[in-house]
Amino acid sequence: MPGPLDLQSIVDDIHRELTPRLGEGKVADYIPQLARVDPKRFGMAIVTVDGDVHMAGDAQVPFSIQSISKVFTLTLALGKHGENIWKRVGREPSGSAFNSIVQLEHEHGIPRNPFINAGAIAITDLVLAGHTPKEAIGEVVRFVRYLADEDDIVIDPEVARSEAATGYRNFALANFMRSFGKLDHPVEHVLGVYFHQCALAMSCVQLAKAGLFLAASGTNPLTRHSVVSKQRARRINALMLTCGHYDGSGDFAYRVGLPGKSGVGGGILCVAPGKASVAVWSPGLNHNGNSLLGSLALEMLASRTGWSVFGA
Ligand code: GLU
């Protein structure tokens, strides 16, 4: 029988082994504010379902979570609208870039999944139902604070402004969907909320805590908050596994074998069901727009712990 895992040593080893490579990859620069981040930052945090926290590097430094926010808004939208959301967005991997417009035209304004930009914009439109944009932004922030049980999570207004000023592609996607009658609210309102959710600033520890409900059948074991049903937690994990890394999702599933969601800020939230929630941050991205060293750190973690959704 192998002994219990020494997760702190595993995280420390990963951090030490990756230190000579810090700075590899390309920091996202299409959002000017993100280009200012130090590419050598690296943080990693594991929060187990028993409540143990293991961390290394810059695990307590807030960074821009960007598309990782799509997991939280999907959870919110499912809570508000239930399975009706699938009339507006699909559940298939896209096989194309995170901000691709080609597929959207073919598919008449129904995005492939909730994690590509078009799909996330459609989900944000659903979160906006019955709210002003300001209220919807408030709801997203409150929800993430509740999930993480951390009151000091905030939105970085500079990042939101920076993205609004340069988000030409996202405006194109949203206008396209609106032209197909697939957005209920004005494009400016939907994107106003979307840019703010992407600009949430969270540390690896906060992010891992916020994702813990997905590792524990829908209930955060630390707060005992019942967030979603067991079945819904499984399904969100399934979407993260198949669609969480854009057109690099297959590669991530192959190498890491766990559900994960990346963001262009260089963060990845990864779920080991029944074991732990893990967050990693390294700003340099690979060619699919996913954190290069972050993916590698998770691959090392999965291989050293034996955590996988594909077998023991
Ligand atoms: N806010 C980014 C965008 O819409 C999110 C992309 C990402 O993190 O992958 O372009």
Image (cartoon, grey):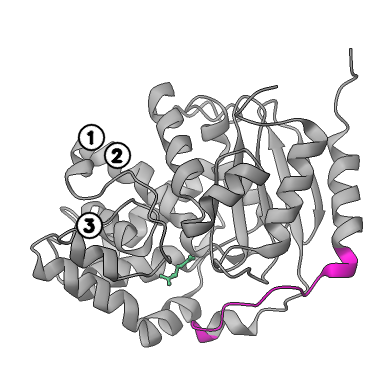
* Marking on residue 78: 2
Query: Gap between marks 1 and 3, in whole Å?
Result: 17 Å
Count of marks overlaid on the render? 3
For ligand 1, which image quadrant applies? bottom left
Q: Position of residue 107 (x, y in %)?
A: 19, 58
Q: Earlier in the sequence, mark 2 or mark 1?
A: 2
Tell me if 51 is positioned left or right of 120 in this view: right
Q: Position of residue 262 (x, y in %)?
A: 55, 57
Label 3, on which residue? Answer: 128
Q: Nearer the viewer, mark 1 or mark 3?
A: 1
Q: Quadrant of the N terminus?
A: top right
Question: Which amino acid, by three-letter code, is at mark 1?
Answer: Glu
Name the dominant secondary structure of the magenta segment.
loop
Q: Quadrant of the C terminus?
A: top right
Label 1 C-beta lies within 8 Å of the nearest ligand 1 atom: no
Frontmost residue, 15 versus 208: 15
- The answer to whether any part of residue 88 appears in the image is yes
Residue range highlighted in magenta: 19-32
* Marking on residue 280: none
Label 1, on which residue? Answer: 83
- The answer to whether any part of residue 229 appears in the image is no
